[in-house]
């Protein structure tokens, strides 16, 4: 059999990079996409992947990326992020727009563009990285909650619409994962980002990547609809046990 092709978005760091590594180790031909091309090319050289610049918020970038693909058996929609933690009353509309663009429309653009190839593969899969924020609204998370709830709805509708087609659809919703996520959310404030994980052991990007690898390796007749993965010390979006 020819090697199957996996596309991973947001692959320059964190869960995306770890997922690309895990899939490559499992025998997939991996295509990685992200805006930070230097990081992307370093990862591609490390794991034997192909790096292509990609901004999921830009339709022309998505079109150019997809035009270079000759096949796609697996799409890992990982590109996303949270910006800020203001209340609804103090919401920054530009931050809300940015979160909607990257999380929701970015997922939509990539999925829509690659669905024909996924169907043509005869056994396509879409794995979307969501968040516990898609399941539990929480104080200060309005914009991110709204975006990830929309991603969850999009993913579920896709699963419904793909019934009878050779495409499986999965949503993986992680809790606390120590990556650059909080650093980005708090606009580069390293001290504030570190406080998110203080007093507990958060998950690593590799923990979620192993879930991606496992879902992708299930046989054709098995669809893992949804996974919620939390650190042992975390019981909900904002409730965790912290050691003094």
Image (cartoon, rainbow, N blue to C red):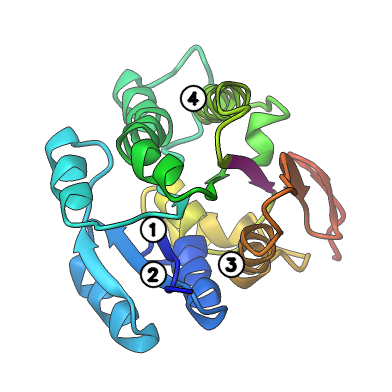
* Dominant secondary structure, magenta: strand
Q: CA distance from mark 2 to mark 4?
A: 32 Å
The image quarter in which residue 93 lies: top left
User: Dots 2 and 1: beta carbons under 8 Å?
Assistant: yes
Q: Who comes first in sequence, dot 1 or dot 4?
A: 1
Q: Which residue is mark 2?
A: 30
Q: CA distance from mark 2 to mark 1?
A: 6 Å
Query: Is 96 located above or below residue 216 in the figure?
Result: above
On the image, the x and y values in percent for residue 135 come to 71, 30
Reply above or below: 144 against 44.
Answer: above
Tell me the crowding category of disc 4: few under 14, some 14 to 19, or many 20 or more residues within 10 angstroms, Cα based: many
Give the image quarter of residue 22: bottom right
Residue 160 in view of the camera: yes
**55 up-or-down from 244: above or below:** above
> Is 172 contained in the magenta span?
yes
Number of residues whose C-alpha sits closer than 10 Å to that of mark 2, classed few (under 14), some (14–19) or many (20 or more): many
Task: Please tell me which residue is depicted at 29% across the width and 86% down the height of the picture.
Answer: 45
Q: Mark 3 sits on what residue?
A: 205
Of the numbered discs 2 and 4, the one sitting upstream in the chain is 2
Find out whether the residues at labels 1 and 4 contact each other: C-beta distance under 8 Å: no
Where does label 4 land, which residue?
A: 143
Residue at mark 1: 7
* In front: label 2 or label 4: 2
How far apart are the two marked residues, 1 and 4, measured between alpha carbons?
Answer: 27 Å
Chain-order first, disc 2 or disc 1? 1
């Amino acid at each position: 059999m020819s090697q199957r092709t996996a596309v991973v978005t947001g692959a320059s760091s964190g869960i995306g990079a770890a997922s690309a590594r895990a899939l490559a180790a499992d025998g997939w031909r991996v295509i990685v996409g992200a805006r930070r091309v230097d990081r992307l090319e370093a990862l591609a050289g490390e794991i034997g992947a192909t790096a292509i610049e990609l901004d999921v918020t830009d339709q022309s970038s998505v079109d150019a990326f997809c035009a270079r693909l000759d096949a796609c058996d697996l799409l890992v929609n990982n590109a996303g992020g949270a910006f800020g933690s203001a209340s609804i009353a103090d919401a920054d509309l530009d931050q809300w727009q940015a979160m909607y663009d990257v999380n929701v429309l970015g997922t939509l653009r990539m999925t829509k563009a690659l669905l024909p190839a996924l169907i043509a593969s005869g056994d396509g899969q879409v794995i979307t990285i969501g968040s516990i924020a898609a399941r539990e609204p929480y104080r200060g998370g309005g914009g991110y909650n709204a975006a990830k709830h929309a991603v969850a709805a999009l993913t579920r509708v896709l699963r419904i619409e793909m019934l009878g087609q050779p495409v499986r659809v999965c949503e993986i919703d992680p809790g606390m994962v120590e990556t650059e996520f909080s650093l980005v959310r708090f606009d580069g404030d390293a001290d504030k980002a570190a406080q998110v994980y203080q007093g507990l052991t958060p998950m690593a990007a590799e923990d979620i990547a192993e879930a991606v690898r496992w879902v992708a390796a299930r046989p054709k007749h098995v669809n893992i609809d949804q996974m919620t993965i939390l650190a042992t010390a975390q019981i909900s979006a904002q409730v965790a046990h912290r050691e003094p």
